[in-house]
Amino acid sequence: MSIKDKPQPSRNRQIANILFLLATVFLTANLILPSLFGSQIPRVPYSLFIDQVQDGEVARASVGQNEIRYQLKGEENQPAQVFSTTPIFDLELPKRLEDNGVEFAAVPPPKNNWFTSLLGWVIPPLIFVAIWQFFIGRAGGVGGPQGALSINKSKAKVYVEGESTKVTFDDVAGVEEAKTELVEIVEFLKNPQRFTSIGARIPKGVLLVGPPGTGKTLMAKAVAGEAGVAFFSISGSEFVELFVGAGAARVRDLFEQAKKKAPCIIFIDELDAIGKSRASAGFYGGNDEREQTLNQLLTEMDGFAAGDATVIVLAATNRPETLDPALLRPGRFDRQVLVDRPDLAGRLKILEIYAQKVKLGSDIDLKAIATRTPGFAGADLANLVNEAALLAARARRETVAQADFAEAIERVVAGLEKKSRVLNDKEKKIVAYHEVGHALVGALMPGGSKVAKISIVPRGMAALGYTLQLPTEDRFLMDEGELRGQIATLLGGRAAEEIVFGSITTGAANDLQRATDLAERMVTTYGMSKVLGPLAYEKGQQNNFLGDGMMNPRRMVSDETAKAIDDEVKDIVETAHHQALTILNQNRELLEKIAQLILETEVIEGDELQKLLGEVNRSENVPATV
Ligand code: ADP
Ligand code: MG
Ligand code: ZN
């Protein structure tokens, strides 16, 4: 994409140029020129001058405050040489000169150069004006006349089709519903009669909603590439300026420009930067600037009536719950398109797009990679392919192998290997048992995905070792048993430490955090507690105006209920803990065997691991849930 409307060289720039020129002239006139010419007069020590005076060699002298210039008596028709010296405080000097017959005079006070003094008067105010202009420029010429001081061009970039790097809908995959929706809009812009002839009206505003990295911005670029109309793109944060009113002016200007170029598309990325609910702003004492910008946007969107110029406003956000309800009203962003994380088939398609750009080995199974990456957004997958290619390049291989992808997935899921973090033998032993504890419980409990690897090589920010569980399929729902299974798996590490060493280390902190969070969500969000019933104690973000985590996210509950919630959470975690202990006690020998093995090899994975985990004792199964 390239930018068509080159920004006009602003007045600021011109003024800055003029100032620069003036400053250069000023400096040349005052500093450089005098020193250039002045440097041709040889300078001598004062004592030499006095000696020459007393020897009667000096013809005439001109005595200034900072400099004495003098001429020696030369031969008749030969230009006498001029010297200069720096005087010291010498009251005797006039007398001495007189005694030795030197013709002398004081230098007249420096004649004020009219040019210099003019510059002295003109330059400071100019600098002041320039600074002023700079700030006015940032403010976008609030309310000012469209004259010298108003620079309120919006920062929107205009994209036009026909660029070499054009993004098309083919570059976007795995978000089919959203694509269909946008293809329809492009269709409308290209061929409006087809819609208007049967009286259909195209939505004025389309809001792309979805988690980060799922391709919202990419899709908007694809619309720009395919629509064949002018495409204004601006990010919500660019509206928000230091000065109140600037954002609003910018919105007004953007829509003005757009209407001139209609039919066209305006794309506002990260709409939440201006579209935050006005109610939530009140808590911080309000944000006037954002509010005015939002109001202006609302006005503009209402402004162009149906049948008027076709301007379609496209916007993207990953926080739709924080948006002001007024924005979502019919006639504004009345159509919301969900751009969600891709499912298995979608991930496969995205991987195919990016795999084209790297050289793949013969053993590559993209389907297997897609299966192992649920929850990855498009951006994650693009990154994954690149990461795998980097690994192959580092190993100086010609093509990317499946193993590179496996390692790349691990890097994303668990972080980078940290060989530098050296554990002592005792720590290593604890980590080994801890991880095998996770693996054994995970292998037995429902809900855990397949245990694919156990490693005691430190990785990422904090993990000293890790157990990699990879899902075998996409899951959209979890039942209570599976959640409890996950909690038990999380506690498996600590349970193993308790059984083997009889003591507890700090290593399980993160496990406990996650287990407790999960248990709390079971009670307060999923209504899975028999005691508390199917109530949502967690406030959905929609109802929680101070969604920035400034307020207790919980519904107002009585003290008894709060206590009951705590009790239930504790009960779930303790039950899971108990389950984990039971499983590990039943499989004590296996725990020992795998732990010893991993202490030697550091990593166990693949068939070897599956065979070992296959030995797990399932006979006397675990006490069921409460
Ligand atoms: P968002 O705006 O939703 O946060 P982006 O559109 O900026 O995400 O996505 C970032 C990058 O990730 C894109 O430039 C593209 O390379 C890749 N990407 C994301 N989603 C997809 C997708 N659905 N198909 C192909 N590539 C994608
Ligand atoms: Mg984006
Ligand atoms: Zn752990």
Image: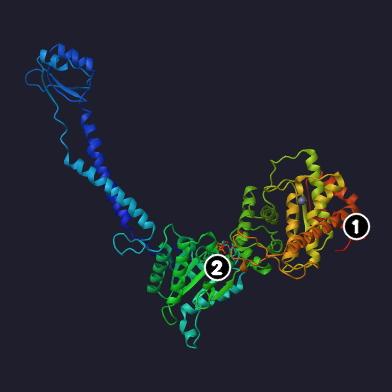
In front of the other: label 1 or label 2?
Answer: 2
Instruction: Kindly give the residue lying farthest to the right in the view shown.
Output: 620
Q: Which residue is denoted by mark 1 in the rendering?
A: 617
Task: Return the mark for residue 111.
Answer: none
Find numbered disc 2 in the image and state the secondary structure of the residue it sits on.
Answer: loop
Query: Badge 2, how many Cα within 10 Å: few under 14, some, many 20+?
Result: many
Query: Residue 277 is drawn in which quadrant?
Result: bottom right
524 sits left or right of 304 in the view: right
Find numbered disc 1 in the image and state the secondary structure of the residue it sits on.
Answer: loop
Query: Badge 1, how many Cα within 10 Å: few under 14, some, many 20+?
Result: some
Residue 511 can be seen, yes or no: yes
15 sits left or right of 587 in the view: left
Instruction: Kindly give the residue lying farthest to the top in the view shown.
Output: 55
Task: Return the mark for residue 323.
Answer: 2
Q: Camera-side residue: 562 or 606?
A: 562
Mark 2 C-beta closer than 8 Å to ligand 2? no
Mark 1 C-beta closer than 8 Å to ligand 3? no
Q: CA distance from mark 1 to mark 2?
A: 53 Å
Query: Residue at position x 22%, y 33% from top?
Result: 34
Residue 112: image x %, image y %?
Answer: 17, 37
Query: Residue 522 is drawn in which quadrant?
Result: bottom right
Which amino acid, mark 1?
Asn
In the image, residue 538 above or below residue 123: below
Which amino acid, mark 2?
Leu
Ranked by sequence position, the earlier of labels 1 and 2 is 2
Residue 429: image x %, image y %?
Answer: 81, 43
Instruction: Kindly give the residue lying farthest to the left in the view shown.
Output: 76
Residue 331: image x %, image y %?
Answer: 50, 78
